[in-house]
Amino acid sequence: VELSGPADSWVRRVSNPGPFIFPNGTVLLYTSADPCPPGWGRAPTCIALFRAPSWEGPYTLLSTSAPLVRPESEDPFVFRDPRGSFHMLTNVNTFHRRCDAGAACGGHAWSLDGLTWSGQAIGAFGPTVELANGSSFTNAYAERPLVYQDALGAPVALFVGMGRSVYADSISWAWRFAGSRPLAQGASPARALAHKQNERRKAQDAHKWTK
């Protein structure tokens, strides 16, 4: 896959890509990238944004002069809620330099168009595991967030990778979003109508991301 950008951009290396694909095929590709410019945080990895007309590329760097969000972070995952707003989840604890073991160090930012973003709120998710019997235990670190959405775009479950020290003792874990409905439950007529209206709006404004 071809990735391109200005020779004087801050991006020298990318990893952990997280694509968001629009109905018309346009892709916004969010990646971990380094090195962060001076003053952007405690670790060398920040978030970059590329755009392509399809998943096959070519991908052009959009965040040429600065990273997409503050502070430094990695493992971006972006989803769009039923109202059309974009949400980004990241790990703001690259190399464990920002938060102590056991702390909630997941980042959350939001956007109206997927291009211009808020700063990240830290604490969106963490390594505390709640079990079905009501008990819980706290792992050390959580990263690699992924969100599962239902057919209407509502977030249902958050998946993360967790570890105590190294990848050898890591696990995968998932939580249900607060207020999410069971997967087998049918959608209400009101939600179905909202979904149709949302799809119609997305089709109408899709040209914004192809310019």
Image (cartoon, rainbow, N blue to C red):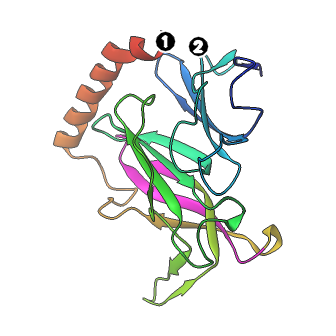
The residue under label 1 is 210
In magenta stretch: residue 163:
yes
Q: In the figure, residue 169 lies in which quadrant? A: bottom right
Give the residue type at disc 2.
Pro
CB within 8 Å, label 1 to label 2: yes
Q: Is residue 129 left or right of residue 178?
A: right
Tell me which segment is drawn in magenta.
147-165
Q: Quadrant of the N terminus?
A: top right
In magenta stretch: residue 9:
no
Give the mark, 1 or 2, whose residue is nearer the N terminus.
2
Up/down of 205 relative to 192, above or below: above
Give the x, y percent position of residue 174.
54, 65
The residue under label 2 is 53
Give the residue type at disc 1.
Thr
At 61% from the left and 76% from the top, the residue drawn is 100
Up/down of 56 relative to 130, above or below: above
At mark 2, the secondary structure is loop
At 32% from the left and 55% from the top, the residue drawn is 185
